[in-house]
Amino acid sequence: MDHHTPPFDPSGFRRALGMFATGVTIVTARAGDGTPVGMTANSFNSVSLDPPMVLWSLAKSARSLPVFHAAEHWNVHILANEQNDLANRFARAGEDKFAGLALETALADAPLLAGCSARFQCRTVFRYEGGDHIIFVGEVIGFDRSEAAPLLYVSGEYALATRLSQPVATAANASNDAPAPFTEELLGYLLGRAHYQFMWGFQRTLGELGLSHGEFFVLSLLAVRAGLDAAEIAAHTAYTGIAADAGLLETMCARGLLVANPGPATRYAPSPAGQAASRQVLAAAYAVEAALVEQLGAREAAGLRNLLKHLIRASDPGLPMLWAANA
């Protein structure tokens, strides 16, 4: 019987550790000559509530180790979901990481970054050897938090956290595990129901203005990119299943919603009446969105937008670019 221990696989160990989702932080301190120093770290953790203490670790090979080892104070910034570029900046070496950043007033001399989900200002109390790392333990002398969704790191990628949802359509005594040709777990059902429930929130405004869904789509498109011809409008709205064809455009011109500009290819733009109608519907849509975000919370809303962007990219049949075309 072979009792030999299998060889240790460092890369596999790293991948296994990567399955543990962590927050993303930037730890800052100030060198003896006053130079600000900072680095991205996901080794942050809490130690004690009374007294309030936290820890993080830094590789012995890190060029910033002497600064942090000598520093009496350091600040830990838990990054918000929109700060991934900042995380990348502080993870790189050989550049002025603080260039262009507005620092806020701190309790001690360590730099304090803005726009984070939470911040902990700390005084060094212990330093421990931890294999190839140094573990820093600090007493929290000040902290603050915001409602911004925190940035996560898992399996080598940035991520966002969302709460697990309860069933939305299944009867209380039914099981989602039972085989069925159509269940609420079908992604198309969830997307379709969410879409129509969202539009139901401002359907009354569409009705008051006498706008069809097709007319609303065309006005919304031309609010972003006016001056498209009929073929371009059809290409941009093809995914809706609504025929934004010449007949619809002529009807909208006759109703005073669009202005046709003749040329080699007739191009269309919203009329003042069309612009006003579009703004009114969009205001109602934003009101529906604001109410939903209030129910979901900022974190859930950020996660939802992120997942929908992933889905749009994954399912894009090759539609023309919209906002990027004007960039």
Image: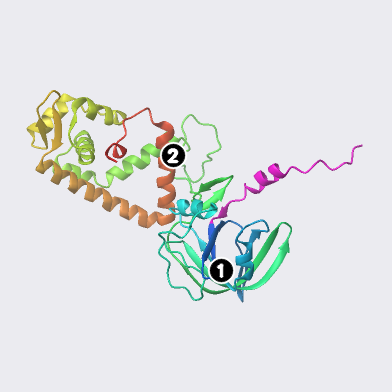
Q: Amino acid at mark 2?
A: His
| Residue drawn at x 55%, y 35% as measured from the top left | 178
Is any atom of residue 161 visible in this view?
no
Q: Quadrant of residue 11?
A: top right
Residue sticking out furthest to the right = 1
Q: Dividing the image into 4 quarters, which one contains the N terminus?
A: top right
- Farthest residue toward the front? 33
Q: Say how many tags the image has.
A: 2
The spot of residue 153 in percent (x, y) is: 55, 50
Residue position marked by numbered label 2 in the rendering: 310
* Residue at the (60%, 66%) spot, across then down: 67
Report the disc number at residue 217.
none
Relative to 56, is 266 above or below? above
Asked if residue 103 shows in the view, the reply is yes
Marks 1 and 2, how far apart at CA = 41 Å
| Range shown magenta | 1-24
Name the residue located 54 percent from the left edge and 32 percent from the top edge.
179
Please state, as top left, top right, bottom left or bottom right, where the C terminus lies in the image: top left
Report x, y in % for residue 204. 20, 45
In this picture, residue 155 sits left or right of residue 287: right
Query: Mark 2 Cα within 10 Å, few/some/many (few <14, many 20+)?
Result: few
Image location (x, y in percent) of residue 324: 31, 38
Which mark identifies residue 31?
1
Q: Position of residue 201 (x, y in %)?
A: 27, 47
Q: In the rendered view, does 316 fall on the left or right side of 164?
A: left
Q: Is residue 120 magenta?
A: no
Is 243 drawn above or below residue 18 in the view shown? above
Residue type at mark 1: give it.
Ala
Q: Tell me the mark number nearer the camera, choosing from 1 and 2.
A: 1
Say whether disc 1 or disc 2 marks the residue closer to the N-terminus: 1
Res 252 quadrant in image: top left
